[in-house]
Image (tube, rainbow, N blue to C red):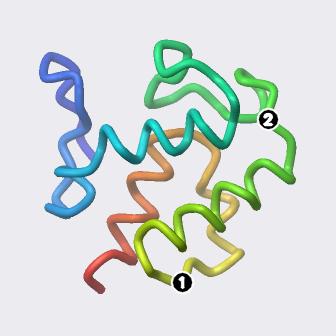
Amino acid sequence: MNVDESAGAPAVTNPVVRERAGEIKALVCRVLETEPDAVGLEDRFVDDLGADSMKLIELLSHLEIEFDVEIDEDELDRLVHLRGVYDVLGDVVGA
């Protein structure tokens, strides 16, 4: 995925994810209990933001509910930062 930092949003090909990128980031911040300014595309949820594995499972669950999709638990390996969340959702939304 390419990132257009000047626009402040990731350049994603999935139109749903692109359109809802701000909402997705807000959901991530709500689940991780952190401020949006503290979460960049590459900030690792566990290493940089102090999340634990239960928070990642909770995030996966919230994403499934919000987007009415099923995300395989194997995708937890990719849900390590915001870019990974966008990538995973891009793969399952509208698929």
Residue beneath disc 2: 51
Seen in the image, is 43 located left or right of residue 73?
left
Residue 50 x, y percent position in the rendering: 81, 26
Neighbourhood count class around disc 2 (C-alpha, 10 Å): few under 14, some 14–19, many 20 upward? some
Name the quadrant containing residue 83. top left
* Picture residue at 71% right of the left edge, 21% below the top: 48
User: Where's residue 94, x and y in %?
Assistant: 26, 81
Give amino acid for label 1.
Glu
Residue at 37%, 72% (x, y): give it: 91
Which circle marks residue 83 in the picture?
none
In the picture, measured across the screen, residue 22 lies left or right of residue 27, that is left
Counting residues from the N terminus, which is met first, the one under dot 2 or under dot 1?
Answer: 2
Whether label 2 touches label 1, CB < 8 Å: no
Name the residue at 58% across, 26% down.
43
Residue to which mark 1 is pinned: 70
SS label for mark 1:
loop
Considering depth in this image, is 41 or 34 the residue closer to the camera?
34
Distance between mark 2 and mark 1 Cα atoms: 22 Å
Q: Is residue 3 left or right of residue 27?
A: left
